Image (cartoon, rainbow, N blue to C red):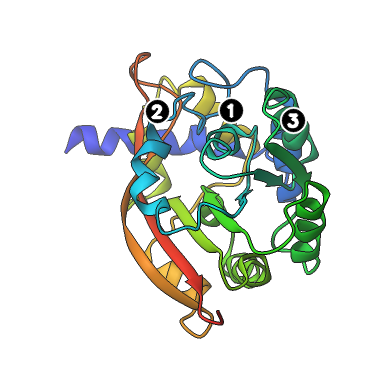
């Protein structure tokens, strides 16, 4: 009982750390990526494990997607998953609404010709046109698959619905959507405690995220049903997932956040 109480002594520190985060999400994300010094297993980015292990766990689910189509990685960050997806699809287009993230992704992916990147807010009204233009530029016009990992849980309900609606013209008749999101069942204090935060110590990548970014929510079956209604989407598969972070508690292996995955296809196809 005492140890359960102690984690709530974190609250004042969390409030202090998060109070300086920019109120505008786009500013926050661009500032965050502009300050990143390194990525991968020993880097600054909390959700970049530096390993292909998580994606390998998704491969049976990705089999629902047409392997002859390009894949669009929504919220690509530094392109860690984009590069992995480029090994399994003819082309991988990474999108992020942070210009600094896209610039880093381009730098880290410069030796992989089947990747490309573009700045795009997938909740914006012109998002589908931006994707179409970016795919045409690399000779991949037409339907595409979509990969989303760790994006929907940081959006509000309106943003989730807008993103899902914008994906319909992207996938068209042949493409599909794979999504994986954190679905942690607990309070923000429980969440950061799960990742190793104590009253006296917070792992540096976690502290950096708390300082600069909006507090994440959760995304599970209930949230998916609202964002991807059955009038627009057919659910092909769903279940639990393991979202891997940069190693925090053990330098030799990633930490894991309970998550959720789903595979969908347009109901209009």
Q: Which mark is residue 197?
A: 2
Could you tell me residue 202's position as x and y percent?
A: 45, 24
Give the residue at mark 1: 208
**Cα–Cα gap, marks 3 and 2:** 32 Å
Q: In the visual, does 23 lie left or right of 59?
A: right
Q: Secondary structure at mark 3?
A: helix
Q: Secondary structure at mark 1?
A: helix
**From the image, which quarter does the N terminus lie in?**
top left
Residue 17 visible from this viewpoint? no
Could you tell me residue 184's position as x and y percent?
A: 36, 49
- Nearest the viewer among 78 and 175 is 175
Residue at 44 percent across and 68 percent down: it is 223
- Nearest the viewer among 245 and 10 is 245
Q: Disc 3 or 2, which lies upstream in sequence?
A: 3
**From the image, which quarter does the C terminus lie in?**
bottom right
Q: Which mark is residue 106?
A: 3
Could you tell me residue 114's position as x and y percent?
A: 67, 36
Q: Nearer the viewer, mark 3 or mark 1?
A: 3
**Cα–Cα gap, marks 2 and 1:** 12 Å
Q: Which mark is residue 143?
A: none
């Amino acid at each position: 009982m005492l140890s359960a109480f102690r984690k709530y002594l974190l609250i004042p520190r969390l409030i202090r750390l998060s109070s300086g985060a920019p109120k505008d999400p786009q500013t926050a994300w661009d500032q965050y990526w502009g300050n990143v010094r390194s990525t991968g297993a020993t880097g600054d980015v909390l959700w970049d494990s530096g390993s292909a292990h998580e994606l390998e766990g998704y491969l049976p689910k990705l089999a629902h997607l047409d392997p002859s189509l390009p894949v669009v990685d929504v919220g690509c960050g530094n392109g860690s998953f984009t590069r992995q997806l480029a090994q399994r699809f003819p082309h991988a287009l990474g999108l992020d609404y942070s210009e600094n993230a896209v610039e880093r992704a381009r730098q880290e992916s410069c030796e992989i010709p089947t990747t490309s990147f573009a700045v795009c807010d997938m909740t914006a009204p012109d998002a589908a046109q931006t994707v179409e233009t970016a795919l045409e530029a690399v000779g991949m016009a037409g339907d595409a698959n979509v990969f989303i990992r760790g994006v929907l849980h940081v959006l509000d309900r309106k943003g989730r619905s807008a993103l899902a609606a914008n994906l319909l013209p992207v996938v068209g008749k042949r493409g599909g959507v794979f999504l994986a999101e954190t679905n942690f069942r607990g309070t923000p204090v429980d969440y950061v405690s799960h990742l190793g935060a104590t009253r006296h110590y917070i792992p540096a990548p976690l502290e950096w995220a708390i300082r600069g970014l909006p507090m994440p929510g959760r995304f599970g079956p209930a949230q998916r049903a609202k964002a991807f209604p059955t009038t627009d989407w057919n659910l092909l598969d769903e279940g639990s997932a393991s979202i891997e972070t940069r190693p925090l508690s053990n330098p030799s292996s990633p930490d894991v956040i309970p998550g959720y995955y789903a595979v969908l296809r347009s109901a209009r196809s």
